[in-house]
Image (cartoon, rainbow, N blue to C red):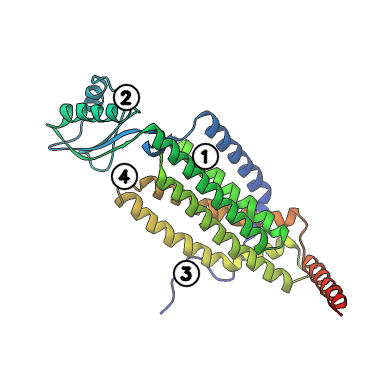
Amino acid sequence: MKLLRLAPENTKFGFMRFRRVSYPLSAALSIVSVVLFLFVGMNFGIDFAGGTQVDMRAKSGEANIADIRGKAESLGVGPVEVQRIGAESDALLRLGVQPGGDAGQQTAIAKLRDAFGADYEFRSVDSVGPTISAELVQRGTLGVVVAIIAVLTYLWFRFEWQFAVGAIIGTMHDLLLTVGFFCVTQLEFNQTSIAAILTIVGYSLNETVVVLDRIREVMRKYKRLSTAEIIDMSVNAVLPRTIMTATTVFLALLALFFLGGHVIRSFSAAMIWGIFVATYSSIFICSPMLIYMGVRAETFDRMREKEAAGADVKAKEKA
């Protein structure tokens, strides 16, 4: 029985010829992501922005979004956001932080129950005060920063410094473009989105390590080839594995996006974006950096000579 192959064997595609396009494109997208983050911002969920979120389901028929918004705004609870989620009968209503702390939040929820209780079932009600939301923002940001520093430190010690620089640039590229994705789509950014960012960083690291390991292996074996030829050979060698991994993860995430419900939709969407960005950066961002940094097979020879010389000096000192 023939095995399923998503990529043909012994491909010889010239990936590095696109590096003059991939770098300006990625630089432009990274700048746009930063500008969007500063001037547009992300759609923070109640975890980080604070407020009240009510998941409602019509007891009969469809949820009338316009009617829900009109009634909620007439209750004097401030700005109201209403959107349809999942089935036609489901709606999500959000209120901002209410004056009066927890008592104000509970008063707003009571008004909503009085206004919609006859026609809608309240499936879940989540409230987060300003103090808790600020603490969640602080802890979430700290968690992301610590995780990224740990990953970058691992990359620095895992590879020769030239390889580590490319890996670090690729990882930061993926992080920036993921932030830009949230700004453009205005998907709700909550604690599950933090998990998505950390997972994307891990997936990017995995793809980067696989590609760089193969490049280093091929570079030591074929010393007469140019760096671009070595990278193309290495990427083509791992291409079947890369496509198979990305495809299987994509199919799983696609099922989660459409069938997993509103709670994990932002996580699934960010991860779908992340697997494409991570695969792209490992090939077109991280790998070409070795060309621009002038890495060749002789680099490893010089490093081994330095290590051997250092070992001899230490041996003589001990003697």
Q: Nearer the viewer, mark 2 or mark 1?
A: 2
- What residue is disc 2 on? 100
> Which of the two residues, 172 or 282, is positioned nearer the viewer here?
172
- What residue is disc 4 on? 262
Q: Nearer the viewer, mark 3 or mark 2?
A: 2
At label 4, counting other C-alpha atoms closer than 10 Å, the crowd grade (few under 14, some 14-19, many 20 or more) is: some
The residue depicted at 37 percent of the width and 36 percent of the height is: 46
> Which of the two residues, 185 or 116, is positioned nearer the viewer here?
116
In this view, 86 is above or below 159:
above
At label 3, counting other C-alpha atoms closer than 10 Å, the crowd grade (few under 14, some 14-19, many 20 or more) is: few
- What residue is disc 3 on? 5
Q: Left or right: where does residue 264 sit relative to residue 182?
A: left
Q: Position of residue 309 (x, y in %)?
A: 85, 72
Considering the numbered disc 1 on the image, is that residue within a helix, a strand or a loop? helix
Please, what is the three-letter code of the amino acid marked with disc 4? His
Considering only order in the chain, which callout, 4 or 1, is on the residue closer to the N terminus?
A: 1
- Mark sitting on residue 180: 1
Q: Nearer the viewer, mark 3 or mark 4?
A: 4
In this view, 66 is above or below 281:
above
Please, what is the three-letter code of the amino acid marked with disc 2? Gly
Please, what is the three-letter code of the amino acid marked with disc 3? Arg
Considering only order in the chain, which callout, 2 or 3, is on the residue closer to the N terminus?
A: 3
Considering the numbered disc 4 on the image, is that residue within a helix, a strand or a loop? loop
The residue depicted at 56 percent of the width and 53 percent of the height is: 280
